[in-house]
Image (cartoon, grey):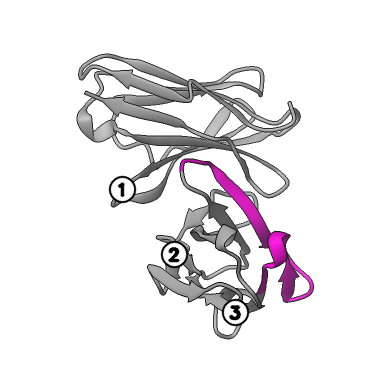
Amino acid sequence: AQSVTQLDSQVPVFEEAPVELRCNYSSSVSVYLFWYVQYPNQGLQLLLKYLSGSTLVKGINGFEAEFNKSQTSFHLRKPSVHISDTAEYFCAVSKRGNKLVFGAGTILRVKS
Amino acid sequence: GAGVSQSPSNKVTEKGKDVELRCDPISGHTALYWYRQSLGQGLEFLIYFQGNSAPDKSGLPSDRFSAERTGGSVSTLTIQRTQQEDSAVYLCASSPGGYTFGSGTRLTVV
């Protein structure tokens, strides 16, 4: 079975600073990897996904993530954050065509 | 439709009553998933449909929970004899294409 560990429950950062949200997964088979964002009182919005191919994946709102198979990681990065990036971020994994398994989430707090 | 639609957006019910939550997936999406999001429990998988069949029901927490899907489209999640611990946001997603989520139904059991 797959599992996902998001290493930080909260990440405070100042506006215009870079940020990295960490995600590690475990699986005995090849998987697909995802990052979702959830703004207060809203649903989940897909930021980016890794299915195959290039290990550097670019998503919406200036976010990117790098798939590292040897370290079983899929960390999310943004070079310069905005106040509007304040939200909860979820890393998720799935076997092909199967259910998503989510991490516990990381709350990103951007301070001015 | 353009996105995944869930109704109602909010539901308050008395303990012991039955509730039905509806999910209308993106047109043509064959896979449909139900999740529950609650404080302290994170995002929990409930059930997965492929077409009208449910090959994975492993996340349904008790026999009070059931779901069906008809015509390979709309799905209904039914909770019988609701309990306070059922209070949560119930999310639906459809696939392929990256698991697109609806806005959810916030269920409050009083």
SS for dot 2: strand
Asked whether the viewer can see residue A50, the reply is: no
Q: Position of residue B17 (x, y in %)?
A: 26, 14
Whether discs 1 and 3 lie on one chain: the answer is: no
Farthest residue, direction top: B17
Residue B59 falls in which quadrant of the image? Answer: top left
Circle 1 or circle 3, nearest the eye: 3
**Circle 2 residues within 10 Å: few <14, some 14–19, many ≥20:** many
Residue B10 falls within the magenta-colored stretch: no
Which residue matches tag 1?
B39
* B110 left or right, relative to B60: left
Three-letter amino acid code at the position of disc 2: Thr
Q: Residue A18 carries which label?
A: 3
Identify residue type, mark 1. Answer: Leu
Q: Which of marks 2 and 3 is nearer the N terminus?
A: 3
Whether labels 2 and 3 share one chain = yes
Which of the 4 image quarters holds residue A31? bottom right
Callout 3: SS:
loop
